[in-house]
Image: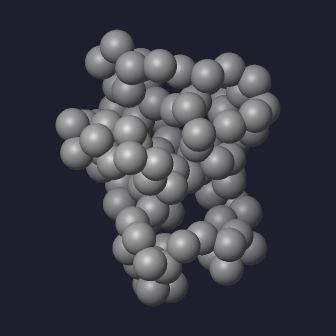
Amino acid sequence: MADFAAAHAEGATVVDVREPFEYVEGHVPGARSVPLGQLAAAVGELPRSRPVYVICASGGRSLSAAQFLARAGIDARSVVADGTGGWARSGRDIVTGADA
């Protein structure tokens, strides 16, 4: 989590692959909502020159998403233990609503 927190503080690209209703209930500030089922359509919009951090609720979807993105040539990382809930429980900020 510390590595992700440092990268996030430096403006890392964060993709939240949960469903929209989960995202609006609370997400990492600046995270872009791209539900797992829509990830293939968004691949071309993600950077290839720097890591992309993928987050979900508990780690299962983000791991699948990171593996998919890696096959597409993106340095994707699923590194947040316990997902968004773990981020919040560690005392870090959470944003509600549809905007990143």
The residue sitting at 74% across, 73% down in the picture is 41
The single residue placed furthest to the front in the displayed view is 10
Where, quadrant-wise, is the C terminus in this rendering? top right
Identify the coloring. one colour
How many discs mark residues in the rendered view? 0
- In this view, the residue in front, 31 or 9, is 9
> Which quarter of the picture shows residue 21?
top right
- In this view, the residue in front, 7 or 94, is 7
> Which quarter of the picture shows residue 73?
bottom left
Left or right for 22, reference 8: right
Q: In the rendered image of this protein, does residue 40 appear above or below residue 34? A: below
- Which percent across, then down, holds residue 67? 41, 71
Where, quadrant-wise, is the N terminus in this rendering? top left
The residue sitting at 68% across, 52% down in the picture is 35
The residue sitting at 35% across, 60% down in the picture is 77
The residue sitting at 52% across, 32% down in the picture is 28
Q: Is residue 48 visible?
A: yes
- In this view, the residue in front, 5 or 57, is 5
Q: In the rendered image of this protein, does residue 82 appear above or below residue 63? A: above
- Which percent across, then down, holds residue 3? 23, 45
Q: In the rendered image of this protein, does residue 38 appear above or below residue 89? A: below
- Which percent across, then down, holds residue 13? 50, 55
- Which percent across, then down, holds residue 12? 44, 53
Q: Is residue 61 visible?
A: no
Left or right for 95, reference 77: right
